[in-house]
Amino acid sequence: MTDLAALVGATIAFDLDGTLVDSAPDLIGAMNAILIAEGLAPRACKDARPFISRGARWLLQWGLGDAGAQDPAARAAALFCRFIDLYGDRIADESRPFPGVIDALKTLRAGGAKLVVCTNKPTGLSRSLLAQLGMAELFDGVVGIDAVTAAKPDPAHLIEAVRAVGGDLARAVMVGDADTDAAAARAAGTPLVLVDFGYTEIPAADLAPDILLHHFDDLADACAALLDKHEGSVRRMR
């Protein structure tokens, strides 16, 4: 087991959908409710799941287009508020934390790390989801797309999320599942952990994370190892 001392004073930033929480059933359920109301056939979860990483608006646009709607971008824009209302009403009906998440978060906190959610989901919806799943108290902050100057893949999102909880970017790790997380971390110069069970059009392994995680049981060791390695590299450059 890796020495967890490197976690003291560090900040671990997490993507939400597809990383911490398997929220696909409720997101796709809300999309399909819109499609049915529009007289279109619902889409299969396995087909829609990869597109969640691009955000709810894109997911809705993809669903409309895949179901044969005319001008799906315009229809998605017109229907988006309705989609958000439907999703908010069912936000935790079927969504669940991925196996091992709760214990991993508790281990990180016990090791002295600050935890922040860095998500392209709106902050209010993110907090609602975490609260309904009994996870909200495990985080020092939740920074959604509406709380930053630019959203992932822009590094500003990650930088501002770390700062929001009083963290130091030089002692931070990004944990995500998709190319938006990878691009933000790389541009910010932050070590990157990706899970291989999330929502992504590009396989997580192909995004060349520093560590590819198969289960959250290994998260604390992974973060500690990356922090220790990153700090060693910084010391050698000075």
Image: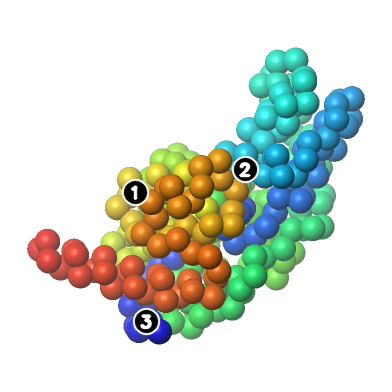
- From the image, tell me which residue sits under label 3: 2
- From the image, tell me which residue sits under label 1: 186
Q: CA distance from mark 3 to mark 1?
A: 24 Å
* Cβ–Cβ under 8 Å for marks 1 and 2: no
Relative image position of residue 195 (x, y in whole percent): 52, 59
Q: Nearer the viewer, mark 1 or mark 2?
A: 2
Q: Is residue 174 left or right of residue 41?
A: left
Q: CA distance from mark 1 to mark 2?
A: 21 Å
- From the image, tell me which residue sits under label 2: 50
Q: Residue at x 62, y 43 (%)?
A: 50
The C terminus lies in quadrant: bottom left
Amino acid type, label 2: Pro
- The part of the image, by quadrant, that contains residue 193 is bottom left
Q: Secondary structure at mark 3?
A: loop
Q: Is residue 75 left or right of residue 213?
A: right
Q: Earlier in the sequence, mark 3 or mark 2?
A: 3
Relative image position of residue 18 (x, y in whole percent): 61, 54
Amino acid type, label 3: Thr
Q: CA distance from mark 3 to mark 2?
A: 33 Å
Q: Residue at x 28, y 73 (%)?
A: 228
Q: Residue at x 70, y 39 (%)?
A: 47
Q: Earlier in the sequence, mark 1 or mark 2?
A: 2
Q: Secondary structure at mark 2?
A: helix
- As displayed, is residue 42 above or below residue 156? above
Q: Nearer the viewer, residue 160 or 22?
A: 22
- The part of the image, by quadrant, that contains residue 36 is top right
**Colour mapping used in the image:** rainbow
Q: Nearer the viewer, residue 221 or 214?
A: 214
